[in-house]
Image (cartoon, grey):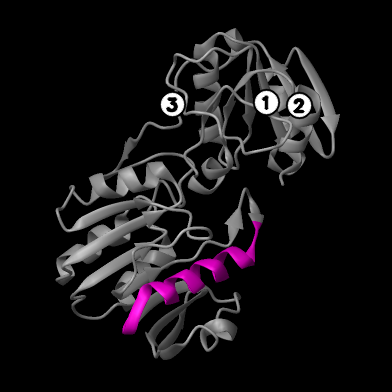
Amino acid sequence: MRAALQVLARERGPVAALQLAGAAHPELRPSAVVQPDRGLRLGLKAPDWDGSQTFEEVHLLATPNREETLAYLALARRTGRPVYLCCENRLGADGWRKRLKPLDSVSLQHCRLLRLDPQLLPEQGDPLELRRVEDFLSCPGLFSWDRFDPGSRLLLEFIAGELPGRGADLGCGPGLLARALLPRGCAQLDLVDVDQRAVRAALLNCNQDVRCRGLWLDLTQEAPPGNYDWVTLNPPFHGQGQEQRALGVALLTRASSALRRGGTLWMVANEHLPYHEVLDELRLQAIEVRQQRGYKLWRCRKNA
């Protein structure tokens, strides 16, 4: 559990609040929430904020993306209620303190809890709004939100020939890899991501092609439909700004389960990550492996 969440619960737990970018905590009982991350949203029992709920103040956890946090602050401003921003030191808490000039600041557990005047917060921004970046739609907070991720670009070059049948891009982000794969002859392509904004962006960037289906899933907790002929995967290994290698292994495990027997996994990852150690356990046979520009690329067949 994030230290910032624990500090927020300790200091502001009993207060009815709109919770932005937060997660479940037994001492927090938000009146409404805004949380596009499926995994964190599953644990929150409060309804999505629709503008009608009443609350005394706004609680916000800083995100690793500064622009995304600013967008949440702009949303908080529009409520007119007192705002409490909690941020771990590793995510730049002192920088936020200097920038936002809080009414009060408390330092606990390597975090800062800032009490903010909503009238002094940014006026423009919406964390759920997609924006145009060159020729695609995206938003701060998504993986590689403002460019075609170099690992995914290498994976696209590595994938040879047609991709017939049913496929899935697990962790699709804004859908730039999926958009490039659609002309390869696939009959159906599932766009799967833990972030609701990514699924929406991917569908739009794929021009709402009838072959595409968007699935908002936390693959560490939920399974896609499965029986795919092929799956593409660029597994994440960071969560909330910290390295979490188990996250990538969990998605690789889900990818293996989702493939039919004889199906193909196309995967790219940073070359230092030891995914080769778990391939056999997951009944994935490496058919082709390539190292390039700090990445490792795999083509694997599911054997059973």
Q: Which residues are magenta?
A: 243-263
Residue 126: mark: 3
Q: Are marks 2 and 1 in contact (CB under 8 Å)?
A: yes
User: Which residue sits at x=60%, y=53%?
Assistant: 239
Q: Position of residue 258 (x, y in %)?
A: 38, 72
| Magenta-colored stretch includes residue 295 | no
| Magenta-colored stretch includes residue 262 | yes
What's the residue type where badge 1 is placed?
Leu
Q: Earlier in the sequence, mark 1 or mark 3?
A: 1
From the image, tell me which residue sits under label 1.
Answer: 85
Q: Is residue 16 above or below residue 278?
A: above
Q: Earlier in the sequence, mark 2 or mark 3?
A: 2
Q: Position of residue 64 (x, y in %)?
A: 60, 42
Q: Earlier in the sequence, mark 2 or mark 1?
A: 1
What's the residue type where badge 2 is placed?
Leu
Q: Is residue 66 above or below residue 180?
A: above
From the viewer's perspective, tell me whether residue 49 is left or right of residue 287: right
Label 1 environment density (alpha carbons within 10 Å; few <14, some 14–19, many ≥20): many
From the viewer's perspective, tell me whether residue 19 is left or right of residue 295: right
Label 3 environment density (alpha carbons within 10 Å; few <14, some 14–19, many ≥20): some
Q: Are marks 1 and 3 in contact (CB under 8 Å)?
A: no
Secondary structure under the numbered disc 3 in the rendered image:
loop
